[in-house]
Amino acid sequence: ILPVDSEHSAIFQCLVGEDGNAIDKILLTASGGPFRTTPIEELANVTAARALKHPNWEMGAKITIDSATMMNKGFEMIEAKWLFGVEPERIEVLVHPESIVHSAVQLADGGVKAQLGVPDMRLPIQYALSFPRRLSLSGERLDLAALGRLTFERPDFDKFDCLRIAYEAVAAGGNLPCVVNAAN
């Protein structure tokens, strides 16, 4: 199975050449969506139009709403558990507003490998279709000097309770993650 979602593709790329015991933890990045800096008290008054304005990615309406609530990140955490055989307590979601680090893996020796690129789904899709080769891709290139800095923060599980619910569902086991997906 070759993942095409940017986060899982990034994790896969970080693991190429590593043995099966290399993973200490997965660092699954999230932009934080349009409400990252919105105070929790104001969330009751947000509009669908505002939720549909993702700061970094061009996506369909459903996935954009799931990104705004971080439900999508909860599903991606569940996917990472099954794709890479890592328990959820070793999958850390990090809010990364720039959406440049698509995800990373902390290895057993403490080193971290990350996959960086501009927010463009063409790259992970092309990588999956051409693996193990890398083909040239036209378009914007990442300019780290122009970017200046990368920031990371822990998610607010009170504000983004959908992410908390996903962690609780996968910890409870059974078919509860499927129930959460169906409810979503």
Image (cartoon, rainbow, N blue to C red):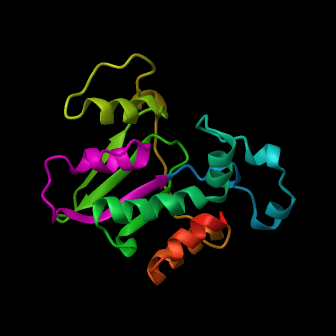
Query: Residue 144 sits in which quadrant?
Result: top left
Q: In the picture provided, is 99 more to the left or to the right than 11? A: right
Q: Residue at x 37, y 39 (%)?
A: 116
Q: Residue at x 34, y 52 (%)?
A: 104
Q: Nearer the viewer, residue 49 or 118?
A: 49
Seen from this angle, which residue lies furthest right?
45
Q: In the picture provided, is 86 more to the left or to the right than 98? A: left
- Asked if the magenta segment contains residue 14, the reply would be yes
Vertical relation: 159 (above or below) 12 = below
- Asked if the magenta segment contains residue 28, the reply would be yes
Q: Residue at x 44, y 29 (%)?
A: 122
The percent position of residue 151, horizontal first and vertical second, equals 49, 49
Vertical relation: 9 (above or below) 94 = above
Q: Nearer the viewer, residue 144 or 180?
A: 180
Q: In the picture provided, is 85 more to the left or to the right than 55? A: left
Seen from this angle, which residue lies furthest top?
138
Q: Nearer the viewer, residue 41 or 10?
A: 10
Q: Nearer the viewer, residue 50 or 172?
A: 172
The percent position of residue 184, horizontal first and vertical second, equals 65, 63
Labels in figure, total: 0
The percent position of residue 75, horizontal first and vertical second, equals 51, 61
Q: Residue at x 42, y 43 (%)?
A: 6
- Magenta segment, which residues? 1-29
The percent position of residue 10, horizontal first and vertical second, equals 34, 45
Seen from this angle, which residue lies furthest bottom?
172
